[in-house]
Image: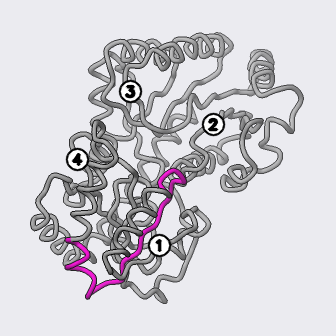
Amino acid sequence: MTKKLTIYFQGNTQFENTGDVLINKSLLEIFRSYGNIVVNDQKLPDYYKAALKLKKEEFSTNGKGGFYQQLFGNAFNSIFRKGHKVMMVAGPPGHIFGNSKKKIKKNLEYSVFLFLLKIMGVKIIRLGFSMGPVGQQQALSERIRSWFTDHYLVRDSISLQLAHRIGINKAQYFPDLAWMYSANGVDLSLANKNEIIFSFRDSIYKDDSGDTYQDKLINSLIYLMDHLKDRFRIKITYQVLQDYAFCKALFDNLSKRGYPVSFVEEQITLENAGEAYKDGVAIITNRLHGALLAAKYDVLPIVLTDVDKHLKIKGIYVDAGLEELLIDASLSNEALMEKINLLLLKRESIIKKLDDIEKQYHSYSTESLKKIMMK
């Protein structure tokens, strides 16, 4: 007898972050092949639901009662209905860090919620996230929360080591969901690969002021412009709405200095990413999913950041064998330019390597999830 599975997903995230849309869309596409999806859409904006390609029947607002009423009601009923199973995807993908009282309280409250689901036989899965650094008290609250989670799947080896170190022994590795994303098709054979793309959030160093960061970044980008402008077109884009002001300021600063740089006013989304990135040779960014989404279009995903502090990027790149694409922001301009020139020379081989890695991760993720879902 075929089991009937209903999978519940909160859906809350940073709605105006294309990277978060990407990984949540990938997550939903994966789970659709295993059962019926119910997403808590009550507070989700329409544009976000459209970006996720949610079907009307997947909206919790399309059912009777609220999301939690449906979840607990279905969980209770499944106890008496042979072959009917319920799964809860616990929390959105993302990054866990810090030691705030608010996060600790939320973890403990959520643990009670998960406990109630567990006693009714609901399978709890958490995936698509990374960790670190976390304080001692938050680590304890995270460990308590994990007691009521059947599958605790982190997206990089640094997070896996941390999870085991704080007592979450059930933690296992599951690659970042971006590797599973199927990008909107554009014909790259018609592309004119002649662009270097800059895309940055407004901080690298956690304790730096915006002015300190901007001054350092501008200095590095001016040096890069001097050495790249005769070989490539340079443009600035942003994938997260909150990055608009900073990226626009970068554009204004470079333009006032007379550099031939363009700025894409429209936020990069999953829908327009193909057009935005198709002509890219490389992207230089400190946004993880800005890099990984651009790579879907054969754009070399170079990360310029404080590598040892930016753990979620470091872990994912090192695991994939892509550490050569990590450039530390503390490098001198000369060393930075030398490294970028070397990467550009090796571009074709690295793009081929990225394609192979994506296929390997896709296969690994598919098989890993199949084992989980068929238990």
Choose mark 1 or mark 3, whichever is in front: 1
**Res 164 → quadrant:** top left
> 100 or 137, which lies in front?
100
Say which residue label 3 marks: 171
Give the number of the mark in front: 2 or 1. Answer: 1
| Figure quadrant of the C terminus | top right
As measured in the structure, the alpha-carbon distance from the residue carrying label 4 to the one carrying label 3 is 24 Å
Residue depicted at x 65% and y 21%:
122
Q: Which mark is residue 307?
A: 4
Residue bearing mark 1: 263
Q: The residue under label 2 is which amino acid type?
A: Asn
Q: Which residues are magenta?
A: 223-243
Q: At label 3, which amino acid type do we have?
A: Ala
Q: Verify whether residue 76 appears in magenta.
A: no
> Which residue position is annotated with label 2?
12
Residue 133, percent from left and from top: 30, 28
Q: Is residue 7 above or below residue 331?
A: above
- Are the residues tagged 3 and 2 within 8 Å (C-beta)? no
Instruction: Give SS at disc 1.
Output: strand
Using the numbered discs, state the Cα–Cα distance from disc 1 to disc 4 in whole angstroms: 27 Å
Residue 63 lies left or right of residue 26; in this view the side is right
